[in-house]
Image (tube, rainbow, N blue to C red):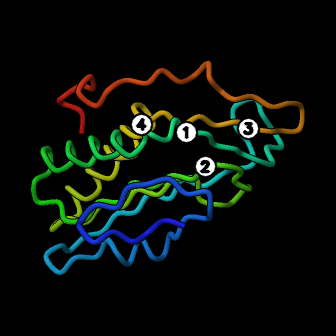
């Protein structure tokens, strides 16, 4: 299970169900009037893949937290008023309807909270070494063909 952080950043991987409600409550900060939470859940289909019944995630674990930290650092550079940031991802099997990834950001105002949260999930998907296997009615795939990881510094500085 993920341990609740003592600071303003919650990063990690978990083989257990993600504590969405706890993360949402934790993200609240007295100086922030907005909390935006992205909850990426396993769905029952993908393009050309009907009947998805299971996702499974693997990670290059020793590289995940440093890359998540780089994302959090970049969020704080782009949106200096941000309060709390959570970037957490499941590993192992994830059933349809369960959370695979949770990104939460608190900020004084909704605009920066939305923008920072969107940047967080988009950058996580582009830079963190986590791979997904989908199992569906007619087959399965690790989906490696669609993923090319980059470093946070390689992203367009104007994005977000």
Q: In this figure, which residue is indicated by the disc labeled 1? A: 59
Viewed as shown, does residue 16 lie left or right of 33?
Answer: right
Q: Which residue is mark 4?
A: 63
- Residue 134 vs 148, above or below: the answer is below
Horizontal side of residue 149 vs 84, given as left or right: right
Residue to which mark 3 is pinned: 134
Identify the residue shown where x is 41% and y is 36%: 63
Is there a contact, CB below 8 Å, between mark 2 and mark 1?
yes
| Sequence-earlier tag: 2 or 4 | 4
State the SS at label 2: loop
Q: Is residue 31 above or below residue 119?
A: below
Which element carries disc 4, helix, strand or loop?
helix
Position of residue 114 relative to residue 25, above or below, is above
**Residue drawn where x is 24% and y is 33% of the image:** 159
Q: Position of residue 44 (x, y in %)?
A: 75, 48
Q: What is the x, y in percent for residue 29? A: 22, 76
Left or right of 118 on screen, residue 109: left
Front residue of 111/88: it is: 88
Q: Which mark is residue 91?
A: 2
Residue 132 locus on image (x, y percent):
64, 37
């Amino acid at each position: 299970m993920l341990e609740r952080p003592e600071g303003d950043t919650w990063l990690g991987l978990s083989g257990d169900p993600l504590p969405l409600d706890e993360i949402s409550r934790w993200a609240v900060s007295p100086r922030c009037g907005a909390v935006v939470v992205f909850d990426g859940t396993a769905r029952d289909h993908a393009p050309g893949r009907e009947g998805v019944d299971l996702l499974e995630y693997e990670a290059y674990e020793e590289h995940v937290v440093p890359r998540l930290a780089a994302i959090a650092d970049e969020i704080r550079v782009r949106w200096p008023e941000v309060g709390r940031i959570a970037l957490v991802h499941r590993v192992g099997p994830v059933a349809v309807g369960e959370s695979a990834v949770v990104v939460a950001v608190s900020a004084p105002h909704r605009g920066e909270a939305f923008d920072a949260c969107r940047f967080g999930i988009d950058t996580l998907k582009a830079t963190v070494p986590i791979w997904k296997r989908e199992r569906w009615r007619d087959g399965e795939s690790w989906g490696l063909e669609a993923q090319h990881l980059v470093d946070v510094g390689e992203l367009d500085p104007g994005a977000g």
